[in-house]
Amino acid sequence: MTVSWLVTHSGGFHADEVLSTVVLSRLFPDASLVRSRDLAWITPAADRLIYDVGRAYDAGAGIFDHHQRDAPLRDDGQPYSSFGLIWRHFGMEYLRALGLPEQDIAPIHAAFDADFVLPVDLMDNGALSPASAGPLLADLTLPMLLESLKPVFDDPDPEADTRAFHAALSVARAFVEAAIQRKAAKARAEAVVLRAIADAGQSRVLELPQGMPFRAAIEKVGAEHLLFVIHPRETDWALTGIRVADDSFTQRADLPAHWAGLTDAALEAASGVAGARFCHNGRFIAVASSRAAILAMAQAAVAEAVGAEVAGAELAV
């Protein structure tokens, strides 16, 4: 298929056609973007893809609108926007174009659809309000931020909408590609963490070769015995807790309370570990000067946490 034109509507824009353009312009870099409502442009033809305009959804004909009466729905009945339709048909090829490993394409496609594309679809169709993010964050959702780049109502420049669309396109591209790369990195990290879990056996401490996402892999294999993670940084070593959920600050075990907020000599004295350098007041991360020192801190933290577990179990009995 030779695509010479990417066609969407003129005038004010929303996040869905901007984000659709991010995907399509990557796949068809030689195609020209046309923003028009003229019938001559929004009528399907072999040389174009039409989206968010045209009042029809026919992938075979290259038209992807969702404003018609028989608007397309997902299998679960939730509405598509043009972004969802474009992602459905072109998302996997887009991920390949970004260079993702083939084994990661399907899971990343599904994950990005669920936590990035679907919210855009729902907001565009009025099925989800930006206010659901809370009164302080409503205007900071990505769709609202992209729309904030539209020109003011009394801008006299006839090219203002087009100029603003291209500005929004650059911003949208950065967010989409960053979100995809984070998911790809998470997939790479999972393989490393799973190997480390196997190497750790029944140890309460997981050692990783560097800082990386680890909670999902720990949850995936049900490694409930793990309490802390250690890894090297540029010039020192870190000891961190493991959150019980992505949206919670509660950890499986906190670092010792008498370490909280201490640094250097005071922390060395409190922990009994030469080389202890810092413990956050929130007791979720500590730092030491060497692997040996961080291992000693980790062992002390495990001893206190396990002791608290035993005491709690005895009280329950």
Image: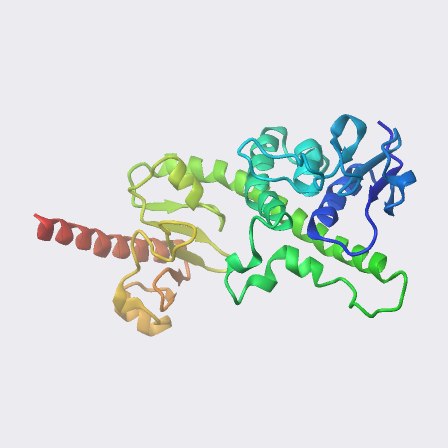
Q: Position of residue 171 (x, y in %)?
A: 72, 56
| Residue that appears at 84% across and 59% down | 163
Q: Of residues 268 and 105, which is closer to you in this image?
A: 105
Number of labelled discs?
Answer: 0
Q: Do we see residue 108 in this rendering?
A: yes
**Residue nearest the viewer, comparing 19 with 201:** 19
Outermost residue, front side: 69
Say which quadrant the N terminus sits in: top right
Vertical order, 250 against 277 (above or below)? above
Q: Can residue 99 be seen at all in this image of the molecule?
A: no
In screen coordinates, is 160 left or right of 200? right
- Quarter of the image for residue 3 reads top right
Locate residue 188, reporting x and y percent.
Answer: 54, 39
Image height of 84 relative to 233, above or below: above
Query: Furthest residue to the bottom?
Result: 266
Residue 67's spot in the image, x, y percent? 71, 42
Residue beneath the point at 36% across and 69% down? 281
Q: Is residue 300 above or below residue 38?
A: below
Q: Quadrant of residue 28?
A: top right
Please name the residue shown 30% across and 56% down the image: 296
Query: How did the renderer colour the structure?
Result: rainbow
Does 123 sit left or right of 29 as displayed?
A: left
Q: Judge by depth and name the residue closer to the eye, 27 or 214.
A: 27
- Give the residue drawn at x 27%, y 56%: 301
Relative to residue 24, is residue 95 drawn left or right?
A: left
